[in-house]
Image (cartoon, grey):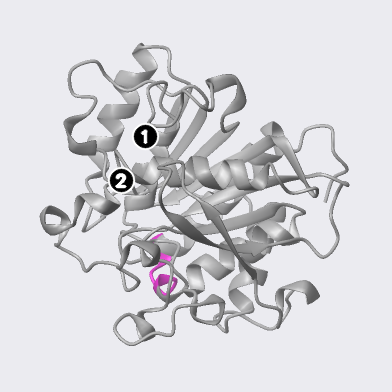
Amino acid sequence: MTAPGFGAAAAMMVASIAAIGIFGSNVRAQNTGALPATVNFPSADGKTSLIGYVFAPAQPRAARAPAVVMMHGRAGPYSTNVKKSGPYNASTLSKRHKMWGQSWSALGYVAVLVDGFAPRGYPGGFGQGTYSDRPDAVNEVTVRPLDAYGALAYLRTRSDVAGDRIGLQGWSNGGSAALVTAAVDAPGIAEHTPAAGFRAALVFYAGCALHQRYDAQGYKPYTTVLAFHGMSDEETKYWRCEQLVQRSRTLGGDISIKLYPGASHSFDDPGRQNVPANKAATADAFASSEALFERILAQGMPPR
């Protein structure tokens, strides 16, 4: 796939990556220095106190801004440099999560990155190839969607958030969790009916087998879902996600997928931008993500 013109979102991507030293030094002032605020809120599982990192806009676009819940992948939210030793806090978040959080806040959104692993005893996340060995306590189909709904409820308590304009974003294992969270039969959906749930979801290189949850009846989201996948992904199978999307569309699902030839897993990781296919995929994914959320979450609000 050939990435379209860069536009505002791709420019923001370059600015955000620049803040962490990959491209030049032209960054938005609010993206330098300040760490996201650390908060705690309950998961919808009724027993876990989650950790959240809030990227709030320095210049809100409205008194109540649109918001984004961000769900990390199997490696957790922190830098690879601290996986085994810590510390696990706002200062050691991975470059990718900081890049996206800063980009959303610079565009006037309130973004919260949810750490669902550390509160359950797995702050360093899990390595590649450990899928079958991960504990049920962090299951992306039965547990992590409840964390997403916990974050949704938390954002709705904030006076600076428009409670009916909240989107969802997830990467890899968190992308799988985002898919299930957006499903009509998601765990926790009884408390958050589709009309009161997430307005849209962005799903990056998810594992789409989803423990065979949708093999029989198929997958149908209650909201708009846009998925992204590299066709040279070495961890998750793009064709499985393509099949899930195609079948979902026959069931009436408002879901689509963008496939990127030559792009790898974690193609938007700042450390992987030396691969041309990853760089093009990242620019396109930023532009497409911004466009979707602007259309659905920020419609009618002052432009940024």
Seen from the viewer's position, the closer of residues 87 and 30 is 87
Instruction: Kindly identify the residue that appears in the image at 58 percent across and 81 percent down.
Output: 20
Mark 2 lies on residue: 140
Q: Residues within 10 Å of mark 1 (few under 14, many from 20)?
A: many
> Callout 2, which amino acid?
Glu
Q: In the rendering, at what x and y percent does residue 103 appear?
A: 66, 61
Seen from the viewer's position, the closer of residues 111 and 283 is 111
> Callout 1, which amino acid?
Val
The mark tally for this picture is 2
Q: In the rendering, at what x and y percent does residue 158 appear?
A: 74, 49
Q: Residues within 10 Å of mark 2 (few under 14, many from 20)?
A: many
Let me know if residue 260 appears in the view: no
Which segment did they paint magenta? 272-277
- The tag earlier along the polypeptide, 2 or 1, is 2
For the N terminus, which image quadrant?
A: top left
Task: Find the residue positioned furthest to the top.
Answer: 251
Instruction: Kindly identify the residue that appears in the image at 21 percent across and 58 percent down.
Output: 234
Left or right of 139 in this view: 117: right
Q: Is residue 54 above or below residue 164?
A: below
What is the secondary structure assignment of the residue under circle 2? loop
Asked if the residue under mark 1 is in contact with the one under mark 2, i.e. CB atoms within 8 Å, the reply is: yes
Task: Find the residue positioned furthest to the left.
Answer: 132
Mark 1 lies on residue: 180
